[in-house]
Every structure is written in C-alpha cells, then in structure tokens.
C-alpha cells in the first residue's frame, strides 16, 4: 500500500500579491522581493505588535499566525511563523493575524490577552504580543482536533502543549512562571491549584470560583476566521518584478529548469532559491539578490510518499510536516523497528530550532545549508544514520545519492536542486550464527545550551546497532553499527567508520567499550577555532558510553539489573515504558510548577495590592507604543553606525566597498559635522565622545553615522563601509587587565565612591588556623539582550529646537548631552520617553549616544532621523557587564569561621569610564553579606582598548556575590566541611553587621536575615533533602545532585526623585515622575500610592481613585532632575515624591472640604474638585523628594535554596527546585 500527500495543487501564477492582515485586504503589484513581512507591516500598516528584536527567528517577538486556505478540502491551515524571516512575496493568498488581530481595545480583548495581564505575565512587554500569538496559534490548532470536548472555559489544549506553545519565545525580564501560568489556564487538564499568583482570585478559593473569575474563553468566538474574499483567490505563487528584481514561483520542474538555465546564461545576476527563508537568520544577507525562486508550488518538491520501503519527503516539505508524517499512523504497515526509528527521528526534529521556525524551514533547505555552507545540522546527522537517499536534479539530469555521498561532495552548484529525501524502512534481521533474532537499537542525542527553543548543538549524534543475544555466550553481540556525529566543529556530519568496524561482531564488554571510546577520541576532533573543543569531544565519548554501557552485563555498573530495556528480560519484548540509559524510567520533561506566598496588608489600600500592571493589556494586544512604533514623520531618514574594528588606530577615511554602491544613502555624519562639543554621553562620572576623531581608542567605538532613506538601506550601507586605518608609530593596544597593570592604565575612582576597609587584616590573618593564599577567579562579560535594541527618533522643531524620542533610562542626561553636542541652550531640547522594551542598565549611558547621533544628523539635514540599532551592532557597541580578575587570600579557623579576607580586583572598564567608578562601592555592598572578620581590598579600574563597560542588572553586586560564595566554598573544601555550615557560621550578628554597614544596618529588630535563614531551612526541608541527596549520590554513579542555601544582603541607596500631580476639572488625575517605566511596574505603584494618599482627604468617591489616575510619559522639559532609573529604587522614590505632592494637595483641599461639609452634609470627590476650580485653588503640586540621612541607605535581606542535578557524562544541569524567602519589609 502506498500513500501520497502533496501540499499544493497550483498550476498557474499571477502578477500581483494579494493577502490579508487582520482581515484587511492588501493587493501589491510592485514589491522588492527582499522585503520581509515584518518590514512591510511595520512600515506600511498600522500593526506594530510585530517587533524586531533578534532578526534571526530566535526570540519570537515577531511571531504572526499565518493561515492558508485549501480549496480542495475546504479547510484552513493555521501555523505561527517568524515575520522577520518570512518574505512578503511568499504570503500570497494567505491571511496574517497579529496580536492586534487576536484582540484589541476597540473590538475587545481576547481572553489570552486578559489572562496574560491578570497573571502578571508581562514586564517590559516587548515580547508579549509574540507570546500571545504563539499561544493563540496553539489554541486554534488544538481546538480543531477531534479530542473530547473540554469543560466550559477551557480549550482542548493540554498543559504540556500550553507550555510548549511558547517554547521558542524569549523573555528577558518577566520570567517564564507567570507566562506559563497564563498559558496553562486554558488547558483542559490544568490543576487550578498549580496556577500562580494573579489578580483574579485569592488563595483558598474553590476551583469553581477561580474559573468563574477567569476571563471566559469560548472557542467558538475566540478563534481565527479566514477572510471570505481570500477564499475566492486561487492559491498560487506570485511572479513579481520590482526595479530589476524578480520573484518567480514556478509550478513545475520544467519551469524551474528553464529559470535555472536562464540564470546560468546570465552570469551577471545573482539568484536565491527559497522555501521558508529561515536560513537568512543564520547566514546574514549583506547584498540583494536579483532573482528569488520560490519552490513551494512545485508538486514534486512538496510530496510525502509512504510505501513499505520507507518514507519519501519532498525537499520543500517543512520540518513540522515531516515530523507529522513520521509520527502519524497510516495505511502503510511498517514494522515495529521502523516505527521506532521514524518516531525517534521525529522526536529529535522537535528539538531543532522552535516551532515557528520548523513551520517554515524545509528539510531540503536544511540539508543544502549543511552541504554548501557547513551548517551544523541535526537533520543531516539523524538521516545519515539511516542511509537516507537524496534525489537531485541538475539540468535534465536526475541522480540518486546517499546522504553520505551528498555531504562529501563539493558544494552543490547553483543549477542543481534537491528534489526529495527517502528515509528507508529499517527492520531487524535473523542472525543464523546466534540462532536468534536480533533487535534493532536506535537512539539520537543532542547537547545544546537549551533543550527546547533556538539553540544550536554543541554536538549531535545518532547511533544504531543490531544486537543479538547468543545462546553460546552470556554477552550481547553488535552487528551493523552506525555511529554518526555532527555539529561539533566539522564541515559536516560524519560516520565513525573505524569505531563501527571495531565494534561489529564483538561481544560487548567493558574492555571492548573502553577500546571503542579510545578510538573515538582520535576521530571526533573539532577544527581549530571551534569553541569548547574539549567539551564537544567529551560529549561524543559520553553519548557512546550512554548508548553501549547498559548493554554490558555488569551489576556493579547497572542498578536493579536493568539495561535500558536491552537485557534478556526486556530486550526482545515490546514495551511501552521508556527507560533511560541508567535503568530508570524516562519521564517526559517535568512541567514547571510554583507557589507564591505573599503577605498583604490592607492598611494602605490599594498600596501593595496585586492589581493588574498598568498597560499590561495594551502590551498583550501590541497597542503599547515603544519608540520604534511611533509613526515616521514626513521625509524621515534612518541611520546606522559605522564602528571601529580596530582596538587602537588612526582613522584616515571611510569609503564603500568597490563595486557595491549602497542604495538610498543621503549622508555620512562624523565628528566633523558636530556643531557643538563632540559629546556622546555625559554624567557626573565622566564623558565619552560621540564619534572618534583622528584616533579610535577601542574596537566598537563609533566612527560615523550613515543616513539613508530606509533602515534597511542604512544597515546595508554601514556593512559595506570600509574604514581606512593607520597604526604606524602607535603603541600596541591594551587588551587585558594584565596589560593595563603593566602599563599603569587606570581610571580614577573619586574618594567619595571608594569604600572603606573593614577591620585589621594583619590581626585577622594572625588569628587564623588556616590560610588560602593568592587564589584566582576570572569573570567574563555578559550582554544585556534587552528585547528592544537601542532606538531613537529626532525631529527638528521651530526656532532651532529639537524633540527626541528615546528609549533611555535617563532622559535628563541625554537632554544635557544633546544640547551641548548641538551647541544650543538646554531649553531648545526636549527628550521624551514613554516606556522601554527592556533596559537592565544598558539603556542608561549607552542610549545617550544613540539619541545624540540622531539629533546631530537631524540638525544637520533638517529632517527627522531615526534609528533602530541592529542586534549585531548593538552587541558590539554596548559593552555589557564588567569582566574582572580577582585574586584573594583568606584566613580561617578550624571550625570554618573566617577571620580575614584580602581581595585584589582588576576590573576591565574598557576605553571610556562610563559608570565604572560605582563598581567598588557596589561590589563591597554585596561582598559584605558575610562577616569576614577583617576585609581588605584593592580595586582598580583598568582602561583598555575594548568597548567601555556599563551598568548591567546589579552591576558589581552579581560579581561580588559570586566571589563571596566562591571564597566560602573554597574554605569549606579546604576543611572538608559542609559548605552550609561554613555559610552559617559566617553570617553576621547585628554587631558585625553594624561594623560592616555602619548606619545602613538599622536597629537590631530590623536584621531579619537569621530568622529568614532558619525559616527557609524549615519551609524547604533543607536538612531532610540534604540527606536524601547524599543517598541519591551514593546510588547513582553518572548523575549527581547538590543543594545549596545562600543568603543575600543588599544595600539600597535612595536618590532624589521628582514628582508632579495635577487634578483635572473632572476629578481625573495626571501624574509625572522622574522614573521611567520599563516593566518594573513603576506606573502601577505610583498610581496605587496616589489613590491611597489622595483618599486621605476623606470624601465620597475616593475608593475609586485608582481608575482616575494616569501616569504620562517622561518629558525632560516638563519634569526636570529626573536622574537615572536604576538600582531598583526608582519606584520607591517616585512613590514618595508623589505622596509628598498629594500631601500638598490635601492640605489645600481640606479647608474647602470642611466648608462644603457644613453646607452640604456630604461631599463627593468630583464636587470637591469642581468647587476647587471655582475657588481658584491650585490643583497641581510638584516636589523633589530628597532622602534624608536616615532613609538614604538601608539593607534588604533574602535567602534561597536551590537543588540541581548534573549529568556527569554530558554536563547537562537541571534545576530541580528553588525556594526563596525575601523580606519585603
């Protein structure tokens, strides 16, 4: 029996592009074939929920639901895709649904968006629309299945599917727990008790009450509707021309051959053959192609054919459809072994990339990239192990090759096309010599930074073997071994034939396995330049060991007599229970679950209430406006940075690569075009130039700014720019802290920012029973990866003024920098910031130069200029976390009590000072969480010719906490003590706390860490679990568990913050604060504080004040002295600032209220405010909150317990459980 499936029936093409976005019809005749769906939607439609973040298909911020109508079967196929990779010309006849199409403020929000909001599942919100669309796609497809009808309010989605629906969506600030809770709330099998903290219900309420309070989900009214007008359009590819660029959609092999022949005759044209275009995410396109050929409408390339010999998959079939074909039951009867192999292949394919990439990427495209460009392919590895056969067409010639032959050939010519891949059907065979049937064993392996989502493997492997249990022997014999390895730093996947040959026909034993491993070590060797080469080689050995070791009859090695289901009791049985390689049942990945316990206090209602975050629902619908969502003004231009690729060199000039003239370039702005001071950033700590002048001081330094008609053209032009350098008579660059020390290259730390030493080091060392001297730690850098990259828009205004919209944490400082750079008074500049798509410190000093560059270009050209920095440039220029080298000496008693710690810390600050001078104080604040007895330190800020480092999410605190724990663990190791005992004995008493932190220590009752420490031990069952882990580790050789309890003492430093509260005539309230909303809920907390503070006027209607408050965007002319939003204190200080404003307003309103009460008996809020207006009472108050000496600094306390499991063979680490207690005060 043979079954055949094709994905297209098209026989013709058309000259225009017709599609729909959120039900709106678009018909285009002139389209640049290189235009992506995202570029079109963001520039030509009002739908801005599709966000550009990574531009590689790796983050999910750009996800849309793509729907295709099948007129033959009268059904709609819905799947999620990356709009940043999907080419616009490929969506002909399709319907696109964005987050606005799922639900919006005008037509009503979808329950997905309401639940995301209510489960607190967004912070900065930049990724939230993509999350919502991913879940929407999963709901749509689940509800189309023939599964049992769910209970009212739920979908047919399962909890597992709900979690996996957002597996490819990256979030950098919210954390996945509330996001997963929002997704799971739709699942038919969800346990309501498992859903975390939310604004819908309170702890202890019944499931019925909880369900009643969830935004109702009715799948009949909440699914996707395909536009009727598109059903009338024949599903076909488009043939389009645009200014010499062509898009072709051949519908037959003959048409394809003709196009390839024409292209071969025209040597001057470049051509790109595409299916899903996902390869562009990995291999960036710096130039345009002349021709694009879409293969999806050729039936032979979209076929899925099954017969008893195997499964043939067309080269244009997507990975998702290939997975379905490999898993589905059908009329063709395959053997159990064949089904096992097909299922294993499908399971491995599900680990490749993310669901929305697999929905677009083709199997053939993946193999072509592996063959032509040495892409680290998983598919090549798994198909190489089953002797896949490839059908290739070159001109009129057709040939069939094994995948091994295909990969070993020179890169495939452009005129050659892969048509299909045949996966043979594998079966066991009778082994006459052993007088027994053999069993086929097949397993795939993959080690990657993440088990799900976009993560290329460090190494992948696939092993198959036929195993015989011979009567004449107690061992197992291997036959027909296939050992395939790939992605480890080699050109393509390989078979380890020498090891296969060695193992074939041998009875397995420990000695044989050892020899096989030694042989393998000589074969799997990564090429020079491959990262982590030793680890990759060890993975190959580890995977082979995992595959073969359970087959060896060794009771010492294997617990419970189980051999991964391979021994004589299980090997030749059909079992539905999967077992892992160490004889334990292999369960599916654990579903995440959590519990939050928060103590609420109604004394200051609504302060502290878990209300929905302000703007969360708009974030979920994609209607929240970020800087790059602001519509471009008329004649707007776009910019891109040209940066230095040399660490130290003279800049002699800039030119474009010969023969590659970039389109649309208007100007190249450099330091010569700056009307004022060459200033890119300015803080109290130092300055940085906007552009390098004659000398570039470090790699990544800005040299110039290309201005073009589109962001795409600006980015291309910047990539094509060639900077001419001269390094003659220059000293070698400083590229490490060691070189900086040798050449005395340091930045100064102001004395006021350098912390004081604690105690007497010499005395402490003398009291020690043991000492560790000159131990070293090296800590690397870290990139911010805010979802929204650096972005700004500068618009020239009348009278030599400039309005700049910036995604920045400190508009005030950008304001001053722009004014000085333009040489104009400060009142000529206005910097406006509404919200950030993530900051983490990277949108502080680093964002100033981005805003200033746009302002300078706009000033010179007298046209609006904007930029959305591409991810690569952002990563190179941003600097990130400070790397450092630490040398420490520590003295300690025999009982683990530390008496003295000396630290020498070299911090790589990069080429400019940025905020580096704050690092010593921040580091010491975190280091002092333990009582070291005496603490001495020498911290140097090294000036190097590398990108300048900036504040990044707890700058200094993170590194210092790591250092403190490393020292504690080193001491415990030296004494062979439990590390928890060493931590416990070195916790502060209040006396030592007062010595280390002085005034910040507070009163003895405020020191809650000891009680937190003990409470956490009880609530987490720390001691009991410690004993259980010891037992686990005794019983398991290759998997080990560990548990750790760690304290945190964080010194909070408050800063002055402004606030302004104005009450409008209708009683509504408008608020301005210096702090910037970037997901931390600052606006929400400010609204709660105002609702509480103004309710103290004690009149009718004040219980509803929360809904009357609106916090508006930061404006540097309206709200001066805004300072930095940083350090996790701006919400607190902003709340205090507006509270003071409210006190002023209440003081003004109370006398009027008293008079009105005498006249009327009762007063409503609206009446009071109207009368205040009539009586000319000032209803606007502003203040600058300045913390006094007693409130400027205080300590926060917390502790956490984490349990992890480590696979000693692969290094895979799993966090099994974490318990945290935090003192919220």
Image (cartoon, rainbow, N blue to C red):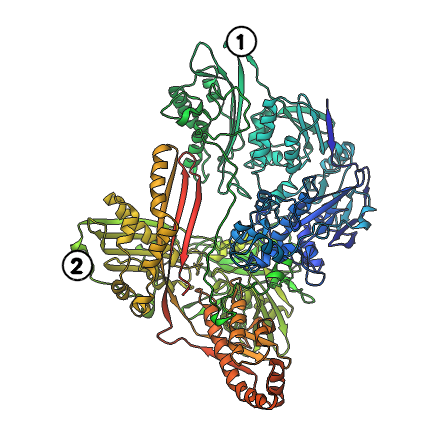
Where is residue 32? Give x, y as percent.
72, 50
378 vs 326, nearest the viewer: 326
Q: How many marks?
A: 2
Cα distance, mark 1 to mark 2? 81 Å
Q: Position of residue 526 (x, y in %)?
A: 46, 34
Marked residue nearer the N-terminal end (1 or 2): 1
Q: Residue at position x 59%, y 59% from top? A: 117
Q: Which residue is mark 2?
A: 763
Residue shown at 82% from the left, 39% from the top: 12
Residue in the image at 28% along x and 47% along y: 970
SS state under label 2: helix
Residue 247 placement: quadrant: top right
Which residue is identified by label 1? 432
Residue 508 horizontal/vertical position (percent): 43, 18
Q: Is residue 1216 above or below residue 105?
A: above
Mark 1, secondary structure of its residue: loop
User: 589 left or right of 1005?
Assistant: right
Residue 960 visible in the current orientation: no
In front here: 758 or 420?
Answer: 758
> Hey, which quadrant is residue 636 in on the image?
bottom right
**Mark 1 nearby-residue class (10 Å; few <14, some 14–19, many ≥20):** few
Task: Please report the residue visible at 38 percent of the width from the left and 73 percent of the height from the top.
Answer: 1191
Question: Do the CB atoms of the residues marked 1 and 2 lie less than 8 Å apart?
Answer: no
């Amino acid at each position: 029996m043979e079954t055949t499936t094709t994905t297209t029936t098209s026989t013709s093409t058309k000259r225009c592009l017709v599609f729909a976005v959120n039900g709106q019809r678009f018909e285009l005749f002139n389209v640049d074939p290189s235009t992506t769906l995202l570029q079109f939607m963001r520039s030509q439609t009002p739908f801005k929920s599709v966000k550009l973040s990574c531009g590689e298909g790796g983050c999910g911020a750009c996800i849309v639901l793509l729907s295709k109508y099948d007129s033959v079967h009268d059904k709609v196929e819905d799947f999620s895709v990356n709009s940043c990779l999907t080419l616009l010309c490929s969506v002909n006849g399709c319907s696109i649904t964005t987050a606005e199409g799922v639900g919006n403020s005008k037509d009503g929000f979808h329950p997905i968006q309401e639940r995301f909001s209510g489960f607190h599942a967004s912070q900065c919100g930049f990724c939230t629309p993509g999350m919502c669309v991913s879940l929407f796609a999963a709901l749509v497809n689940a509800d189309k299945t023939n599964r049992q009808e769910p209970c009212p309010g739920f979908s047919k989605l399962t909890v597992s599917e709900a979690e996996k629906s957002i597996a490819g969506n990256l979030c950098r600030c919210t954390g996945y727990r509330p996001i997963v809770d929002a997704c799971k709330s739709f699942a038919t099998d969800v346990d309501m008790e498992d859903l975390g903290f939310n604004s819908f219900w309170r702890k202890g309420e019944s499931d019925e009450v909880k369900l009643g309070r969830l935004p109702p989900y009715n799948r009949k009214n909440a699914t996707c509707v395909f536009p009727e007008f598109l059903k009338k359009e024949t599903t076909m590819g488009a043939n389009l021309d645009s200014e010499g660029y062509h898009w072709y959609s051949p519908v037959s092999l003959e048409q394809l051959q003709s196009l390839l022949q024409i292209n071969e005759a025209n040597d001057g044209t470049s051509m790109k053959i595409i299916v899903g275009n996902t390869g562009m995410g990995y291999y960036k396109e710096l130039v345009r192609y002349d021709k694009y050929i879409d293969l999806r409408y050729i039936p032979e390339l979209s076929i899925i054919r099954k017969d008893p010999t195997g499964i043939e998959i067309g080269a244009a079939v997507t990975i998702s459809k290939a997975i379905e074909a490999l898993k589905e039951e059908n009329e063709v009867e395959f053997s159990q072994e064949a089904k096992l192999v097909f299922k294993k292949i499908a399971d491995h394919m599900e680990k490749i990339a993310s669901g929305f990439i697999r929905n677009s990427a083709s199997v053939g495209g993946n193999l072509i990239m592996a063959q032509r460009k040495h892409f680290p392919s998983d598919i090549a590895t798994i198909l190489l192990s089953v002797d896949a056969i490839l059908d290739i067409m070159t001109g009129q010639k057709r040939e069939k090759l094994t995948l091994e032959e295909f990969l070993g050939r020179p890169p495939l010519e452009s005129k050659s096309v892969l048509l299909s891949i045949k996966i043979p059907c594998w079966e066991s065979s009778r082994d006459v010599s052993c007088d027994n049937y053999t069993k086929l064993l097949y397993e795939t392996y993959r080690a990657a930074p993440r088990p799900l989502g976009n993560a290329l493997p460090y190494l992948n492997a696939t092993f198959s073997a036929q195993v015989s249990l011979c009567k004449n022997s107690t061992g197992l014999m291997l036959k027909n071994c296939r050992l395939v390895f790939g992605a480890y730093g080699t050109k393509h996947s390989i078979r380890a034939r020498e090891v296969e040959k060695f193992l074939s026909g041998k009875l397995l034993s420990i000695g044989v396995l050892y020899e096989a491993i030694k042989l393998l070590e000589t074969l799997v060797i990564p090429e020079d330049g491959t990262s982590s080469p030793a680890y990759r080689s060890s993975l190959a050995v580890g995977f082979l060991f995992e595959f073969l070791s359970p087959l060896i009859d060794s009771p010492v090695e294997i617990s419970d007599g189980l051999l991964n289901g391979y021994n004589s009791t299980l090997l030749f049985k059909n079992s539905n229970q999967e077992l892992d390689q160490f004889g334990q049942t292999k369960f599916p990945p654990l579903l995440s679950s959590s519990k939050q316990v928060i103590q609420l206090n109604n004394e200051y209602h609504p302060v502290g209430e878990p209300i929905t975050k302000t703007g969360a629902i708009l974030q979920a619908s994609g209607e929240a406006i970020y800087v790059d969502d602001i519509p471009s003004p008329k004649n707007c231009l776009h910019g891109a940075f040209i940066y230095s690729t040399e660490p130290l060199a003279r800049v002699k000039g800039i030119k474009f690569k010969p023969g590659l003239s970039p389109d649309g370039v208007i100007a190249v702005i450099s330091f010569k075009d700056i009307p004022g001071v060459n200033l890119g950033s300015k803080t109290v700590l130092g300055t940085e130039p906007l552009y390098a002048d004659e000398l570039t001081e470090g790699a990544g330094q800005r040299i110039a700014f290309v201005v073009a008609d589109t962001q795409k053209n600006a980015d291309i032009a910047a990539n094509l720019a060639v900077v001419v350098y001269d390094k003659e008579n220059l000293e070698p660059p400083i590229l490490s802290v060691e070189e900086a020390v040798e050449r005395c290259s340091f930045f100064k730390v102001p004395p006021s920012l350098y912390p004081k030493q604690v105690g007497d080091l010499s005395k402490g060392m003398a009291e020690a029973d043991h000492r560790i001297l000159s131990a070293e730690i090296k800590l690397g850098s870290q990139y911010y990866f805010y979802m929204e990259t650096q972005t700004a828009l500068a618009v020239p205004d009348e009278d030599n003024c400039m309005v700049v919209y910036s995604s920045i944490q400190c508009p005030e400082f950008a304001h001053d920098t722009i004014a000085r750079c333009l040489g104009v008074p400060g009142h000529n500049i206005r910097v406006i910031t509404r919200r950030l798509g993530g900051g983490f410190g990277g949108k502080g000093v680093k964002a100033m130069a981005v805003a200033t560059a746009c302002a300078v270009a706009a000033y010179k050209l007298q046209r609006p200029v904007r930029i959305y920095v591409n991810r690569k440039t952002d990563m190179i220029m941003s600097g990130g976390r400070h790397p450092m080298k630490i040398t420490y000496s520590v003295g300690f008693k025999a009982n683990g009590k530390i008496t003295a710690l000396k630290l020498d810390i070299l911090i790589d600050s990069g080429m400019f000072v940025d905020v580096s001078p704050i690092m010593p104080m921040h580091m010491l604040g975190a280091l002092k969480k333990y009582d070291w007895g005496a603490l001495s330190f020498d911290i140097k800020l090294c000036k190097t010719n590398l990108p300048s480092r900036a504040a990044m999410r707890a700058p200094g605190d993170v590194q210092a906490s790591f250092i403190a724990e490393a020292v504690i663990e080193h001491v415990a190791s030296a004494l062979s003590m439990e590390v928890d005992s060493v931590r416990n004995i070195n916790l502060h008493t209040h006396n030592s706390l007062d010595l280390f932190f002085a005034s910040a220590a507070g009163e003895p009752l405020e020191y809650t860490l000891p009680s937190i420490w003990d409470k956490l031990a009880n609530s987490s069952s720390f001691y009991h679990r410690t004993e259980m882990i010891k037992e686990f580790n005794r019983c398991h050789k290759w998997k080990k568990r560990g548990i750790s309890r760690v304290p945190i003492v964080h010194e909070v430093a408050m800063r002055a913050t402004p606030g302004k509260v104005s009450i409008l005539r209708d009683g509504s309230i408008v608020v301005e604060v210096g702090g910037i909303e970037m997901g931390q809920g600052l606006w929400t907390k400010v609204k709660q504080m105002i609702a509480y503070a103004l309710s103290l006027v004690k009149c009718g209607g004040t219980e509803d004040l929360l809904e009357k408050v609106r916090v508006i965007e930061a404006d540097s002319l309206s709200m001066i002295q805004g300072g930095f939003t940083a350090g996790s204190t701006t919400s607190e200080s902003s709340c205090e600032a507006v509270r003071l404003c409210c006190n002023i307003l209440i003081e003004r309103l109370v006398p009027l209220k008293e008079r009105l009460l005498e006249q009327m008996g009762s007063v409503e809020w609206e009446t009071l405010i109207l009368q205040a207006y009539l009586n000319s009472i000032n209803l606007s108050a502003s203040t600058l909150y300045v913390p006094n000496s007693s409130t400027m600094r205080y300590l926060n306390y917390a502790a956490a317990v984490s349990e992890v499991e480590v696979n000693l063979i692969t290094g895979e680490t799993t966090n099994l459980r974490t318990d945290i207690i935090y003192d919220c005060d």
